[in-house]
Image: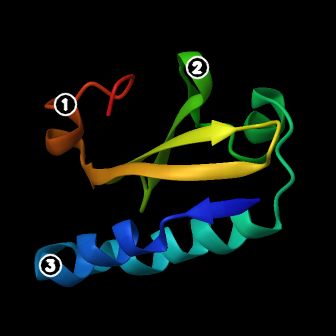
Amino acid sequence: MRIIALSTLKAFWEEHPAHLDAKEPALAWYRHALRANWAAPADIKADFGSASILRDGRVVFNLAGNKYRLVVWINYAYRVAYIRFIGTHAQYDRIDAQTI
């Protein structure tokens, strides 16, 4: 998969030192996603059973033992994943994962 944009992940822990513990889990997800070939939501569920599949290609991943949420929009046809959001559960609760 092609992942856009790693900078969103980096900004999260660099701009908020309290979230530095998200770095390794987020990078582990990133490395895994780079090697993945997700052609359908079922492929994601096979890799990440706890991932939540939303409408229109949106997927929510749990990171760092479910401490953080990662929202990604996936274009399955082109094998591209767009990182839309990373944050704590409290931050996630304040957004609309379907539109962010």
Residue 77 horizontal/vertical position (percent) = 83, 36
Residue linked to disc 2: 56
Give the residue type that dot 2 points to.
Asp
Residue 20 horizontal/vertical position (percent) = 25, 81
Which residue is at the far top? 55
Residue 93 got which mark? 1
Crowding near the residue tagged with mark 3, few <14, some 14–19, many ≥20 C-alpha atoms within 10 Å? few
Marks 2 & 1, CB-CB < 8 Å contact:
no
| Comes first in the chain, label 2 or label 1 | 2
Q: Quadrant of residue 32?
A: bottom right
Residue 62 horizontal/vertical position (percent) = 46, 47
Who's the residue at 21% across and 72% down the image? 19
Q: Quadrant of residue 50?
A: top right
Asked which secondary structure carries label 1, the reply is helix
Crowding near the residue tagged with mark 1, few <14, some 14–19, many ≥20 C-alpha atoms within 10 Å? few
Query: Which mark is nearer the camera, 3 or 2?
Result: 2
| Comes first in the chain, label 1 or label 3 | 3
Residue linked to disc 3: 15
**How far, Cα to Cα, is label 1 from label 3?**
20 Å
